[in-house]
């Protein structure tokens, strides 16, 4: 073990870094772009595509009625039924999100 070389360390002590290595970690001054809108649009699009695939992949003829006179099914009205499935998924996700926010706020109030 006496003939092994000492391990090189990257430290600010004793100016062991070269000037080029120091410049590699300097901030550029540019702010990071926020991609929140892109993520939200892509999640909505993926959810809608999933609802279309669920509607098309169904072997049974499923029917939904919004009123006694307005009914649609999954075989004849694919787009309308897909919107129905999408809205159902969106309502469930929104309910879970609201329950999470309420529980978080309630838990913070209980801690105080």
Image (cartoon, rainbow, N blue to C red):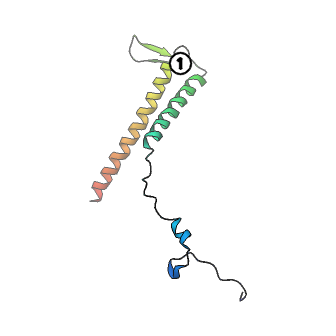
The front one of 43 and 81 is 43
Residue 13, horizontal then vertical, whole percent: 50, 80
Left or right, 82 with respect to 108, comes to right
Say if 77 sits above or below 23 in the image. Answer: above
Residue 19, horizontal then vertical, whole percent: 53, 72
Residue 97, horizontal then vertical, whole percent: 39, 42
Q: Quadrant of the N terminus?
A: bottom right
Q: Quadrant location of residue 95?
A: top left
Left or right, 100 with respect to 43, comes to left
- In this figure, which residue is indicated by the disc labeled 1? 78
Say if 78 sits above or below 90 in the image. Answer: above
Query: Residue drawn 52% across and 34% down?
Result: 46
The front one of 111 and 39 is 39
Query: Residue drawn 48% across and 64% down?
Result: 26
The front one of 45 and 76 is 45
The local crowd at label 1, few if under 14, some if 14 to 19, many if 20 or more residues have their Cα within 10 Å, is some
Query: Residue drawn 49% across and 37% down?
Result: 43
Left or right, 65 with respect to 17, comes to left
Q: Looking at the image, how many numbered discs can be counted on the residues?
A: 1
Residue 21, horizontal then vertical, whole percent: 55, 69
Query: Residue drawn 47% across and 28% down?
Result: 86
The front one of 80 and 32 is 32
Label 1 residue SS = helix
Farthest residue in the bottom direction?
2
Q: Quadrant of the C terminus?
A: bottom left
Farthest residue in the front direction?
19
């Amino acid at each position: 073990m006496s003939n092994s070389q000492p391990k090189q360390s990257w430290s600010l002590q004793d100016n062991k870094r070269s000037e080029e290595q120091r410049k590699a970690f300097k901030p550029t001054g540019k702010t990071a772009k926020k991609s929140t809108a892109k993520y939200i649009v892509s999640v909505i699009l993926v959810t809608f595509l999933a609802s279309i695939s669920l509607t098309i992949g169904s072997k049974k003829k499923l029917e939904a009625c919004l009123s006694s006179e307005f009914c649609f099914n999954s075989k004849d009205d694919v787009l309308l039924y897909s919107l129905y499935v999408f809205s159902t998924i969106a309502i469930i996700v929104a309910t879970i999100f609201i329950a999470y926010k309420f529980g978080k706020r309630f838990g913070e109030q209980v801690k105080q």
